[in-house]
Amino acid sequence: MGMITTTDTALDEKAMIASAEKALSEIADVRREVSKVIFGQEQVVESTLLAILSGGHALLVGVPGLAKTKLVTTLGTALGLDANRIQFTPDLMPSDILGTEVMDQDEHGRRSFRFVKGPVFAQLLMADEINRASPRTQSALLQSMQEYHITIAGQRYDLPAPFHVLATQNPLEQEGTYPLPEAQLDRFLLQVDVGYPELAAERQILLDTTGISDSHASSVLDAERLLSIQRLIRQMPVSESVVDAILSLVRSVRPGQGNAETDKHVAWGPGPRAGQALMLCARARALYEGRLAPSIDDVHALAEPVLQHRMALSFAARAEGMAVRDVIAALVKQNKA
């Protein structure tokens, strides 16, 4: 059995730096292609890209007309992924998402069942207005989002790799909608709040999208290259101080852990998946910004999109008009001190 020498370690580090620099250049190209179509919304684009680079799913929450659908379509093109879109409606059935078995008959009269794949068999699945479908249909996505395969009539069918779900949700309309259950919300790596564009960006939208031709993004990556970048992100080192910051933040949001403010305002807090999401996304954010290791600042910057859909406020906090992001901001400030 050979020994690992200092030279080998140096070579590994050199190779990782080269891989990171190449990935950084490609990510910059993806951002440039997305910016041809999506004006402004840098934070939204960054968070959505971080979710994909981390190998996870994202929930985009915003009022209609803020280019959520266009962002997902553009990312699919720039990342070179096979993309499908499902418009969720109250009458949508699980088989409309997963697929169904049909009966075939050959020339000898023998009958057999054949599985016809549904739109879930894509590398990038857009679940548009996901909260408009019934809980039965929403739950059809649970297995695919967590285990990357589905089971129909006892038969397992693997989904293509990579597999990402980008779902959109309108926070205003509540009539005719079905709130996502906590178990499904927890499967989303990030919740990305999509706000109104800045004045300069909205001016550019008016000028560039009302002419004869629209701008289009070009493909930068493909599925294999995206998978290799995702593997690179998982190999990035994380210091003990960053791990401690993640644990401190996640545990401080749970009632019963000795934090008086949390006990007063939070009904229930995030589980271990929140810590896993912070570890992955902090690494991805470091690479996104050209660094080879995440910092505590990355953890604090990602606190809101990682935690806000994994916790709920108490009745007293809601009665006082508090929002989840207010509680998270206060806890982040407390953890910084």
Image: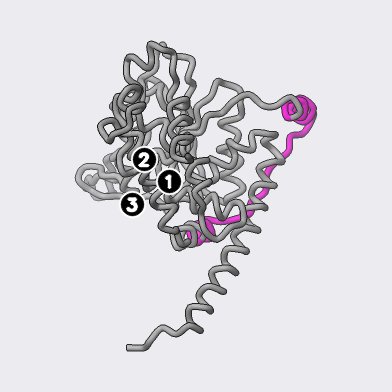
Reply yes or no: does residue 220 show up in magenta: yes
Report the disc number at residue 250. Answer: 2
Name the image colouring. one colour
Q: Is residue 142 magenta?
A: no
Report which residue position mark 3 lands on.
158
Q: Which mark is residue 278?
A: 1
Q: Is residue 108 shown left or right of residue 62?
A: left
Q: Amino acid at mark 1?
A: Leu
| Residue furthest front in the image | 337
Which of the 4 quarters of the picture holds residue 116? top left
Question: Does dot 3 land on a helix, a strand or a loop?
Answer: strand
How crowded is the residue under tag 3: few (<14 C-alpha within 10 Å), some, or many (20+)? Answer: few
User: Residue at (26%, 44%) from the top-left corner?
Assistant: 151
Q: Are marks 1 and 2 in contact (CB under 8 Å)?
A: yes
* x and y percentages locating residue 90 in the rendered image: 37, 19
The image shows residue 306, relative to residue 129, as above or below, that is below
Q: Amino acid at mark 2?
A: Val
